[in-house]
Structure formats: structure tokens, C-alpha cells
Image (tube, helix red, strand yellow):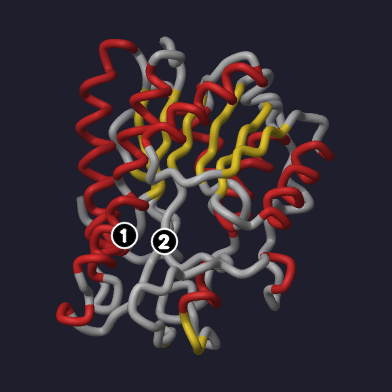
Amino acid sequence: MAKPKKFPEQQQTQPGKESKMHPEPEVIRQNYKGSDKLKDKVALITGGDSGIGRSVAVHFAREGADVAIVYLFEDGDAKRTQQMIEAEGRTCLLIKGDLKEEQFCQGAVQKCVKHLKGLHILVNNAAMQFPKDSLEAIDVKQLHQTFETNIYPYFMITQAALEHLTSGDTIINTSSVTAYRGSDHLLDYSSTKGAIVSFTRSLSQMLAKKNIRVNGVAPGPIWTPLIPATFDDVSDFGQDTPLGRAGQPSEVGPAYVFLASEDSSYITGQFIHVNGGEMIGA
């Protein structure tokens, strides 16, 4: 199991630049062929500058969607993602800011709708983690920051988006395998991911009568910038899965395409588990 880095108290875990990772994550398979599953749709993706968010954005673009991505501070990663989306012949809007702020969440949705002329798919994906080996090491400030980053924005940006979503539109939330089996060094993080599962299931029931589907993806160990930024030793990262390796973002992105498209028109309140074969209960 990868060993957590020892961070000073309250230091934010910042994902490194994706282009400096070794090996660099695979965003989309070279042989992935788009088939207009999301043609002329507009998607808003939080945490879309790198990792899973970047992969989702590029997959959506290859399927014909225009994309707005929300990110916190990594301008270089965000611009690279924008270039990749534009290379697919689609438009990408970059929105920089702090999702912990309600006014910013509202403004991000407004910018997306104004510049891209609509909103059909909302992907709540942004998150952070602060590994700690004991409950006593998690102080109140860290607890607030983890919850205010990982779950509060799901409420706030979804509230803002609902004004623009209509029948057939979709919301996709990113949880984690840790929500289902726990984590002895990511207690507060896994707690927020469990909250996302409950949020998804409850919201799906609330919006079913409007035919707005709400689903989620619960990734296992995926090779993203958050991993080397969070752990000192990543040499064995993902090797404890049945498949014996970490997953690539390119192996997660298609799950979001499925949930965003008409292929999943009879699915709501559910999670897809992209985790290398770990058995997960309900």
C-alpha cells in the first residue's frame, strides 16, 4: 500500500503538474472512437484540469460535447486540457476559482450557460485529501476543509445548475472505493465520499419525476496527479487490486460517457465501480 506523505498541519495537498508525472497518465486511448453520443451537449466538469476530470472532459469532447472545466490553481494543466478538447474540434471554457464559495459556484454555472449556450451534463468531481494515520491527527480545520471542498460544492453547484437542466439531462458525481470499504489513512476523505453516495441516491429520487438522472462513478486506485502529491512511495500503488495494478484515467472516462448518454437512459441513483476488480457491496 502506498505510504502517505507527512504534511505539516493544514498544508493543502496540491496535485502536481500532470505532464511531470512518470509515467504520464493516459487520458484517452488512441483507439477510442467517438460516435456522437454527446453531440452538441454542454458539460460542466469540476476538477476538470487533470486526472479523472481531464479524461472525462476529453472523452466528452470526442463524443461531440463542448466543455467548461472548473479548476482551482493549476493554470498549466487547465490550458493543456483546453488544448486537448479543442483538438477534438470542440469548445472549452476555463473557469478558475474556489468551489468552497457559494457565489463562485453560482457564477461558474452562469458563465458556462452564457458562453456555451446551455448546460446538459454536470460532473461533480473536484476533491482533495490529507492522509493521516490516526483520528487524533485530524484537527477541526482539516475536517472543515475536507468537507467544504469534497461535498459542500456538490450541493451548491448542483443547486445553481438545476435552473438550466431539463428532461433528459444528467448529473454525475465522483465518489470513491473508500466510501464502500473505508480507508485507515483517509478517514475524513472517505467520509465525504460516503456522503456523496448518499447525496447521489437521494437526489436521484428527488429529480426522477423531472427525468433528470443522477448517477456516479466510484473509482479505485487511479494514476492521477493527486497520488504522487499525496504519497511518498507509489511504487506499489494499486498492486493490491485483483488486476494487480493501478488504473489509468482513460479506463475511467468511458464510464462517465455511458452515464451522460442515452445508453444509460433507464439508470439513476447508481454507481459504476472502476476499481480493478475489488468486490463492492451496496
Position of 269 relative to 251 (above/below): above
Mark 2 lies on a secondary structure that is: loop
Looking at the image, residue 51 sits to the left or right of residue 20; the answer is: left
Q: Nearer the viewer, residue 55 or 247?
A: 55
Amino acid type of the residue tagged 2 in the rendering: Met
Q: Amino acid at mark 1?
A: Thr
- Across and down, in percent, residue 265 comes to 43, 22
Dividing the image into 4 quarters, which one contains the N terminus? bottom left
Is 278 or 248 nearer to us in this picture? 248
The first of marks 2 and 1 along the sequence is: 2
Q: Are circles 2 and 1 on residues that touch, CB within 8 Å?
A: yes
The outermost residue toward the left is 136
Q: Residue at x 35, y 14 (%)?
A: 211
Q: Residue at x 71, y 26 (%)?
A: 64
Crowding near the residue tagged with mark 2, few <14, some 14–19, many ≥20 C-alpha atoms within 10 Å: some
The percent coordinates of residue 200 (x first, y second) are: 28, 37
Can residue 137 be seen in the rendering of this structure? Answer: yes
Quarter of the view holding residue 88? top right
Q: How many marks?
A: 2
Q: Which residue is mark 1?
A: 146
**Which element is circle 1 on?**
helix
230, 247: nearer the viewer: 230
> Can you identify the residue that label 2 sits on?
128
